[in-house]
Every structure is written in structure tokens, then in C-alpha cells.
Amino acid sequence: GIFGGASYRRLAALFGFQERFYRRAVGDLRLGAGGRALDLGCGPGGLSYALAERSPADASIVGADISNDQLECARRGAGAFACGMEFLRASMDELPFPDGHFDLVMTSMALHETPPAVRRAAIAETARLLRADGTFLLVDWSRPRFGLWGIIWYPFCRWGERNRDNWNNVYPELCRERGLELKEDDYINSISRRQVFVKKRGGGPLRKPWPQSAGKILMCDEVGFYAFSATL
């Protein structure tokens, strides 16, 4: 459909979500030999591809998404990279991997699409799945700074209960409660914020996970401004 797969990728590119964006999102993060990464709400694979470009052949990257169209699109491009890549259908708040399985968990423009309870459960899952000293890369919209995209998206970001977490950038606090310490915080453009967290040794869930939402997210993609603006 128009909001999935190759059509989605073309539409996302119109909003600036192209290869350059994902390379800037990954920044200097790398997987070492045998390293494992997980991409939450992977969409058609842009963030996974950007990491795969700089990953050794024995590394592996798993992308998780609910949309079959997005996953099929991501799988078609996976063969272009030396490292192992797998794209599976799973919700970001309930993932089929053991504790401490990943060196890197990352997500790009996906958390804002989910209800607040699912965001919190996804962060709890991230803390569970990361090894000690593992890294969490979180890219999502935040309170706009002055610039073209900030001006365009300000009216859609400013109001609404669903937008409050991102507007107030509650993610450092939510991550800290799960043993994830903020190490880097900057903007990729005037609205897209890049934050990097590290799991402290002895960290992990510091209290019971938040309850699962009865209205669990059914779609978690990389951009999601279409679903996002429709909720205002």
C-alpha cells in the first residue's frame, strides 16, 4: 500500500528521511566482530542498512516491525550487505529474545507512533535485551528548533496528550529508571533528536515493567507522520 514498502520509502524521502539521514543517525556507532543489533520499528530498513554498511561480516542485525509490507521491502535490500540481516514481525514491547542478547538496540522515528504505555514497555524491553555496557540509540522528533522542518511541523507537535512525551523529552528520565545512562544528545535536523544511552553494569529493569496496553500498537515505522498527524 501507499503507506508501506517502496511507496512508503519514497514518501519518507520527501520529508528528508533518506540515506544521509540514517547515516547521521548511526553516527560513529559500530558493531564489533560478532556483534548483534536490534532495530525497533525498522520500517523498510533505512537505519538497519546504515549500520550494516559499517558492520563486519560476522555481525548480525535484526529489524522488528508489525507491517508485513515494510518487512518485505527491508528484506529485499538485505542481500547488499556483508553482515547477517533478518527482519521479523514483532511488536517493540514484546520481543522473542533472551536477556542481554544485543550489543546495540536502536530505533528511528518509531516511538512517537505508539501509545505512552507501549513506549515505556519498549524501553523496558530495551534494557532487558541489552548486555551490560550495551548501547541504545533513540532517534525521534523532539521540541522543534528554528529551521525549515521545525517551522513546518511545529503546529502538529505542540499540542495533544500523545505528543507530550516527545515535546518534553521524557526519554532520558524513562531510560534512567531502567538503568540506561544518557551519553550523547543532539539534533540531526531542526526536529529529529538523536540520543545515545549506555546500559550501566548491574543495570536493567529497576522495577516491574509497565502494564501492557490493551490498545497495543499495530504499526511502528520509521517516520509515521501520517499516523502521527491523524491523531491530533
Image (cartoon, rainbow, N blue to C red):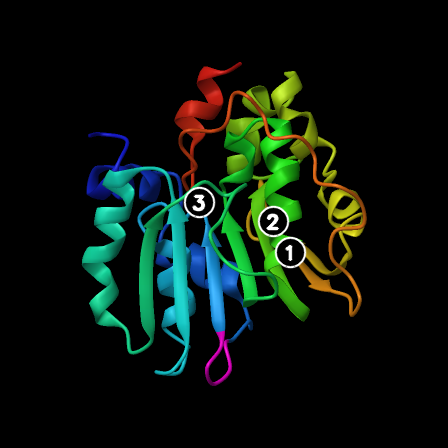
Of the two numbered discs 1 and 3 on the same chain, state the one appearing first in sequence.
3
Q: Is 150 situated left or right of 221 in this image?
A: right
The label shown at residue 194 is: none
Name the residue carrying label 1.
128
Q: Nearer the viewer, mark 1 or mark 3?
A: 1
Q: Nearer the viewer, mark 2 or mark 3?
A: 2
Instruction: Name the residue rendered at 65%, 22% in the picture.
Output: 158
Q: Crowding near pointer 2: few (<14 within 10 Å), some, many (20+)?
A: many
Name the residue carrying label 3.
41
Element class at badge 1: helix
In the image, residue 190 lies at what x, y percent? 58, 43
In the image, residue 98 lies at what x, y percent? 54, 60
Name the residue carrying label 2.
125
**Magenta-tinted stretch:** 31-35
In the image, residue 104 lies at what x, y percent? 56, 65
Give the residue type that dot 1 points to: Arg
| Secondary structure mostly taken by the magenta-highlighted segment of the chain | loop
Residue 29 in view in this figure: yes
Instruction: Name the residue rendered at 53%, 30% in the picture.
Output: 114
For the N terminus, give its image quadrant.
Answer: top left
Q: Quadrant of residue 14?
A: top left
Q: Crowding near pointer 3: few (<14 within 10 Å), some, many (20+)?
A: many
Q: Is residue 207 above or below residue 195?
A: above
Element class at badge 2: helix
